[in-house]
Amino acid sequence: MERRITIVGDSLGQWSDGFGLKSKLPSEFKVTDISVAGYTTEDWLQNKNRMNEIPTDLWIIELGTNDAMVYGTNGFESRTKELISFLESAQTSRILVTAIPLTNMVSIQETIRTNNQILRNLKDTKPNVDYVEIESIFETYSGSLPLYPVSDPIHPNQIGYELMGEAYRKKILGI
């Protein structure tokens, strides 16, 4: 039985080739990544019909970095809830939101931390919503190589994308 996953995100999703999930998951999983660099929750709300065209059993929502830069914490919770409500009303599917990495851009780290807590709290009020904890994985990483290239404080290197992909894989498979 095919299990369909759709990733709705920003450049972290787009540039990571869907966090490598097509090769990390068993063959019964069909992964579609519609992430768009630069997109915020507002952009996805304006393009929500694009999401509704894709039959999906599990949505992975990987958004927040651009929201932190553009809006701060202003309206993040209401936009995210609106996006989730749309997905819930359009299809019967589960939704994973992402507590995203704080990045190496110090000016948005506290905003991301606040927005991530909003995402974590959604699990208590939305029965079809769970979250993937990427923030703490990055914060507790103790490897010898950095997770971000010196030239880009926002987008992780391959090691960072691998950590994200593994976290999604484990959550999806219940490991």
Image (cartoon, rainbow, N blue to C red):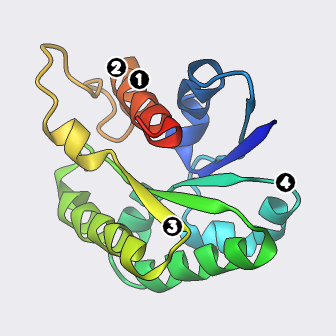
Q: Dot 2 corresponds to which residue?
A: 159
Q: Tag on residue 162? A: 1
The three-letter code of the residue at mark 1 reads Glu
Q: Quadrant of the C terminus?
A: top left
The three-letter code of the residue at mark 3 reads Val
Q: How far apart are marks 3 and 2 (CA)?
A: 27 Å
Return the residue nearer the eye: 76 or 127: 127
Q: Note whether 11 is above or below 151 in the view shown.
A: below
Q: Tag on residue 129? A: 3
Mark 4, residues whose alpha carbon is within 10 Å: few (<14), some, or many (≥20)?
Answer: some
Q: Which of marks 1 and 4 is nearer the N terminus?
A: 4
The three-letter code of the residue at mark 2 reads Ile
Mark 1, residues whose alpha carbon is within 10 Å: few (<14), some, or many (≥20)?
Answer: some
Q: Which residue is drawn at 28% across and 62% down?
A: 112
6 left or right, relative to 146: right
Give x and y (percent) for residue 51. 78, 61
Give x and y (percent) for residue 26. 65, 22
Q: Distance between the residues labelled 2 and 4?
A: 30 Å
Q: Can residue 152 be seen in this view?
A: yes
Do the numbered discs 1 and 2 sit on residues whose CB atoms are within 8 Å? Answer: yes
Q: Quadrant of residue 159?
A: top left
Q: Which of marks 2 and 4 is nearer the N terminus?
A: 4
